[in-house]
Image (cartoon, helix red, strand yellow):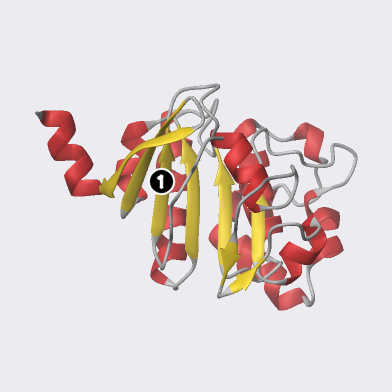
Amino acid sequence: LQGVNLSLAHGVQGIVGRNGMGKTTLCNAVTGLVPASGSIRFAGEEILGLSPNQITRRGIAYVPQGRRVWPSLSVDETLKLVARNKRDIERVYAMFPRLAERKGNGGGQLSGGEQQMLAIGRALLLEPRLLVMDEPTEGLAPVIVERMAAAILALKAEGLSILLSEQNLHFARMVGDRASIIEKGAIRWSGTMPELMANDAA
């Protein structure tokens, strides 16, 4: 990353770019998974240099690229490991009814879309104020992508802020309020989604 400068007050901020441009590195830096220099502030507090678990406790949850669900644990076991109470798990099942149908299945038995739902549900159980999502639509069928969009829009309506790394520009437009284009580790353009669409049309 080179001199990345961006801010997110509320809503969905898209980080758009092709593979290898630095999107995952940016997500990992925000969540403390890779060392970084400069300043990363969350709710007025400097979090650069904190461990990932310290950052999570401050209200940032991560849905990593590739889902990273535990293959041998069932859906229900995975959620129970994170949840503070049963009501929170029921909320995840209400958001993703397919997970409720598959609650006894291991993570390794789920489809890509189901794994992504589980990864999002697991992150939401941490009760974050900011959700960092890295390539949530990667490898998913169009109908599942539409469900992901509906879920993200519902979370945004509830007041959750989301940092969304995505190479699928159409998806980013569906859910985002603002966007930044990243190329070779640097932010090349930032603006609102209408501005991005106008520039693209031009």
Residue 186 in the image: state x and y as whole percent: 46, 34
Q: What residue do we see at 40% from left, 56% from top?
A: 12
Residue 155 is left or right of residue 27, and the answer is left
Residue 179 in the image: state x and y as whole percent: 34, 46
Q: Which of the 4 quarters of the picture holds residue 60? A: bottom right
Residue 165 in the image: state x and y as whole percent: 50, 40
In the rendered view, tell whether residue 105 sits above or below residue 163. above
Residue 73 is left or right of residue 115, and the answer is right
In front here: 194 or 76?
194
Residue topped by disc 1:
14
Amino acid type for the residue under numbered disc 1: Gly
In the rendered view, tell whether residue 138 sits above or below residue 163. above
Residue 180 is left or right of residue 201, and the answer is right
Q: What residue do we see at 79% from left, 75% from top?
A: 84
Q: What residue do we see at 86% from left, 56% from top?
A: 77
In front here: 143 or 140?
140
In the rendered view, tell whether residue 55 sits above or below residue 174. below
Q: Quadrant of the C terminus?
A: top left
Residue 117 in the image: state x and y as whole percent: 61, 47
In front here: 102 or 198?
198
Q: Residue furthest right?
A: 72
Badge 1 element: strand
Q: What residue do we see at 71% from left, 67% from top?
A: 126
In the rendered view, tell whether residue 173 sits above or below residue 44. above
Q: Quadrant of the N terminus?
A: top right
Q: Mark 1: few, some, or many residues within 10 Å (few <14, many ≥20)?
A: many
